[in-house]
Image: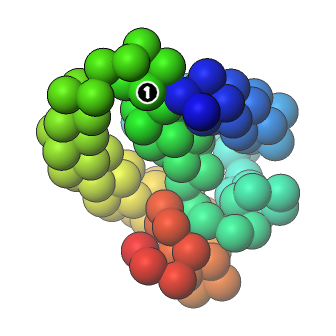
Amino acid sequence: AGDVLVALGLFINLVVFKENSYGGSTIETVEDQKVINTGLYAVVRHPMYVGVLIMICGIPLALDSWWSLSIIALAAPALIWRILDEEKILKSDLPGYVEYTRQVRYRLIPFVW
């Protein structure tokens, strides 16, 4: 089950990078960057982080290390902080992002947040 979750998380991230070549580890915008609102971005605003969260859940299971599931308790707040910080920058620096947030309401989990 853990291996499947890790593979699923990696697959989601590959799909996201194919859809959005602007994705990366640094929060920044570049000239002529456009809002991506297709593919997984039509479902949630941060699908790359969905893949990361799925991998974070799968790794302890794949390694048969149940106690390390507690890492989720540390990673989830850090991920939330990162998303909120990223959205501040995107709203101010990326034309069309505010409208996109009205179209795609959920940041990470559909019908939840």
Depth check: give the residue in front, 47 or 9: 9
Q: Residue at x 62, y 77 (%)?
A: 104
Residue 39: horizontal and vertical position, in percent? 83, 57
Residue 56 position, x and y percent, is 41, 32
Tell me if mark 1 has few (under 14), some (14-19) or many (20+) residues whose alpha carbon lies within 10 angstroms of its own.
many
Which image quadrant: the N terminus?
top right
Q: Left or right of 28: which side holds 66? A: left
Residue 101 against residue 5 in the figure, above or below:
below
- The coloring applied to the image is rainbow
- Across and down, in percent, residue 78 comes to 22, 42
Foreground residue among 50 and 103: 50
How many numbered markers are drawn?
1
Q: Secondary structure at mark 1?
A: helix
Any part of residue 99 in sight: no
Residue 61 sits in which quadrant?
A: top left
Q: Is residue 33 left or right of residue 75?
A: right
**Above or below — where is 103 with respect to 73?**
below
Instruction: Give the quarter of the figure containing the C terminus.
Output: bottom left
The image quadrant of residue 40 is bottom right
Disc 1 residue type? Leu
Q: Is residue 110 visible?
A: yes
Give the labeled residue for mark 1: 61
Q: Position of residue 26 (x, y in %)?
A: 42, 27
Residue at left 69%, top 45%?
Answer: 33
Residue that extends furthest to the top in the rendered view of this protein: 63
